[in-house]
Image (cartoon, rainbow, N blue to C red):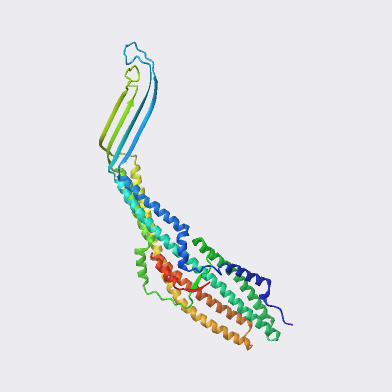
Amino acid sequence: MPLNTSLFNTKENIFVVIIAACIFHTSIHAQEKDLLALYQQALSYDASLSSARFQNQATHELIAQGRSLFLPNINMNAGYDENDNQRKIYTKIDNALLSGTKADYNSYDYGITIRQPLFDYSAFAKYKQILTQTSLSDKQLIYSQQDLMYRISLFYFEALMAKDQVDLLQAQRAAIQEQLLQAEAKYDAGLISIIDINETKTKAALVEAQQIAAIQKYKIKKRQIQSLTGELPGKLKRLNPIISFEQIDTPLQKWVSIAYENSLELRIKEDEIKIADREIDIEQSGHYPTVDAVASRTRNWDKGGYPYGSTNNKGTRSFSDVLGVQINIPIFSGGLTSSRVREAKLLKKKVEQDAEYLRRQVELRVRENYLNLKATFEQIKSYKQALESSELQLESTKIGFNEGLRNGIDILVAQQVFFNAKKDILESRYNYLMYLINLKLSVGMLTMQDLDQINQYLTLDPI
């Protein structure tokens, strides 16, 4: 009586199929998505990029605030008072002005002052600092856009990698099922031992567990895309299997030079150094005088006239008009200004050292991405050869098994080598594209054109 050892009719296997069906059901009728389409969605949804946009808009408002430092400052004041005064007199002098002991009256006044800065080095230094801050903010916004290109590309290719892993495991399960059927037939014929059956069952269970994990990983990767686009992607266009990549010809040192000139991270640090330099000017301006042109007019009315003993009901009025120049010369502030200048100079040195550290890191990243790109290009060729060899090895092992020269374990090993080779070549192709994106990002040259070029590598056959 043949052994009923097939693992592919169990409840557990049915459960795996149901899970897979549920996962992919929502994408059957969904609109096909490619890398460029997902990036366009992310442009309007990604919170990180939106934050950078608002920060940039807010920073540009500083320009108007800086201009205000050179424009006139106009202030107006007005007042109204109710006066209730009372006094005691300890004199016998007969004087009409001193005879009154109580006075109730009201008074009101207004004034306007116009102040026009003529010389204020602090205002000039602050305005120059603001212009540098807006330049820095513009660069940060561009870098945020490039970072979004990187993140959406990373999540997209990781999702494709995860889906490839699911498909490979599914294909491996089918191959193991076929092998198990053959092993059962040989066992029934008494040609092999139960060891081959048990080994095949064990391998099937392991692949089944790996497939469950791969499906879960694929779900997570699609959720990561959703976090950038606001929508769970349906079908994703896969990488065209027949495309071939071109090896980069630009020398490594040329890429490093481009990074020194164009890296947004380095340009941002340069602006931070300029801002720190302007801060020194601002603090040093505490030693300099300020000159303002001032014009003012004040009017005052007291309806009670002299408050006590006056018979003049018309009260008194006073007028004042002033036009002149005011000079404010700082003499001594307890050493505060000098201390702030020293502090600003030290902070500038700190920013300069940060910039030097970043410069070295950028160069390191460029070199790493370049070398990884070159190595991956060579790996793709090697993995292609390994795939062809492993396929031939698998076929020869199957022939040997049918002729009794090989056992089932040999086939399982050959199958694993074959599927590992397929997995390696698929991953190396995705890695090549990501290293290329990383290299462009590290030198500050990642653009929509690059995404569009990579998008052309995607096939019309979605997953």
Where does the image place residue 419, in percent across and percent down from the top left? 56, 77
Q: Quadrant of residue 260?
A: bottom left
Q: Is residue 210 left or right of residue 122?
A: right
* 54 shown above or below 34: above
Q: Is residue 121 visible?
A: yes
Where does the image place residue 391, in percent across and percent down from the top left? 54, 82
The residue positioned farthest toward the left in the image shown: 324
Q: Is residue 372 visible?
A: no
* 21 shown above or below 326: below
Q: Residue at x 41, y 60 (%)?
A: 143
Where does the image place residue 169, in percent across and percent down from the top left? 58, 74
Q: Quadrant of the N terminus?
A: bottom right
Q: Quadrant of residue 324?
A: top left
The residue positioned farthest toward the bottom in the image shown: 403
Name the residue nearer the viewer: 226 or 421. 226
Where does the image place residue 136, in percent across and percent down from the top left? 37, 56
Q: Is residue 158 left or right of residue 121?
A: right
Q: Residue at x 52, y 80 (%)?
A: 387
- Total tally of numbered discs in the picture: 0
